Image (tube, coloured by chain):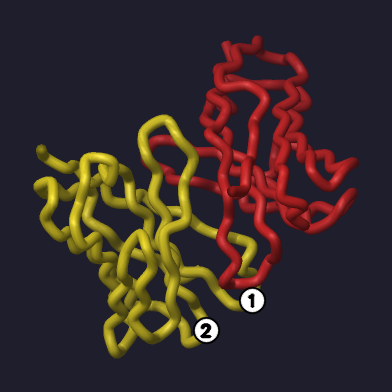
Amino acid sequence: DVKVTQSSRYLVKRTGEKVFLECVQDMDHENMFWYRQDPGLGLRLIYFSYDVKMKEKGDIPEGYSVSREKKERFSLILESASTNQTSMYLCASSPSLGVVSPLHFGNGTRLTVT
Amino acid sequence: DAKTTQPNSMESNEEEPVHLPCNHSTISGTDYIHWYRQLPSQGPEYVIHGLTSNVNNRMASLAIAEDRKSSTLILHRATLRDAAVYYCILRPFQGAQKLVFGQGTRLTINP
C-alpha cells in the first residue's frame, strides 16, 4: 500500500515564524500535492509538483511556497505564519496527473498559529 | 469548474445498503466522477471513479445517470467503519491535477 507520511500531526507556531511542513511518500510517485482543509470550505489546493524541482500553483498559493529536492519529499513552507493559516494541511501523492489516477493522502498536520 | 451538490448528512443502519446521491448538472463530456471518503482523523481515501458506465469495486458501486447529471455511490452493506464524510468530485480531463473537494456528505451508521 502507498504510504504518505506527514512529519507532524499537530504543530503550534507563533505569528511571523517560518514554518516547514514535511511530507514523504514511499511509492516513487511523480506527483505530490499540498491541500488545506477548513470547515465549510472543503479541501483547497495550495501547490502541486509533477517532478523534482517542478511546481505549479494551485488555487490558494498566497503566503506559501514549496520545495521538492527529492522525488519522495515535498515540503510546504509558510514564510511568515499568520493566524489565518491556522488549518489542517494534507499532503497527497499520485503516480500520474491523469484523470483516472487516484490521490493518496497522508493523515494531515493540524497547524495552529497564535 | 463544474460543481457538485451533495446532502450535508445522511444516516443509515449497520448491515443495510446506503445510497449517497450527488448532483452535477453542469458536468462536461470529459469530466470523470470520483468519490473519496474521509474517516475521522484521517486524510481522504479514494473510493471509486467512473465516466459513463456503472462501476463496481471491492469498496462500493457507482451508478451514473444516463444524462450524467447525477450519480449515486452505493455501499452494499454498511458497517460502522463506513462512517465518514463522502466527497463527490468532478475531475476534468484537462487539468485533472486540480481536484476540488466540496463539503461532502457526513454519513452516520447506527449499530
The residue under label 1 is which amino acid type? Answer: Gln
- Expressed as whole percent of the image width and height from the top left, the position of residue A68 reads 84, 43
Is residue A60 among what the camera can see? no
Which of marks 1 and 2 precedes in the sequence?
Answer: 2
Is residue A81 among what the camera can see? yes
- Expressed as whole percent of the image width and height from the top left, the position of residue B19 reads 19, 63
Above or below, B84 relative to B7: above
**Label at residue B30:** 2
Whole-number angstrom distance, CA of label 2 to CA of label 1? 8 Å
Above or below, A59 relative to A110: below
Label 1 SS: loop
Give left or right: position of A11 versus A67: left
Same chain under badges 2 and 1? The reply is: yes
Q: How many marks?
A: 2
Label 2 SS: loop
Task: Tell which subunit mark 2 falls on.
Answer: B
**Label at residue B94:** 1
Q: Chain A is drawn in which colour?
A: red
Please give the name of the residue rendered at 37% of the width and 63% of the height, measured from the top-left corner: B58
Give left or right: position of A59 versus A110: right
- Expressed as whole percent of the image width and height from the top left, the position of residue B65 reads 27, 83
Q: The yellow chain is which one?
A: B
**Which residue occupies the foreground of this view, B6 or A22?**
A22
Above or below, B107 relative to A90: below
Q: How crowded is mark 1: few (under 14 residues within 10 Å), some or many (20 or more)?
A: few
**Label at residue A23:** none
Above or below, B83 relative to B74: above
The residue under label 2 is which amino acid type? Answer: Thr
- Expressed as whole percent of the image width and height from the top left, the position of residue A83 reads 57, 20
**Are circles 2 and 1 on residues that touch, CB within 8 Å?**
yes
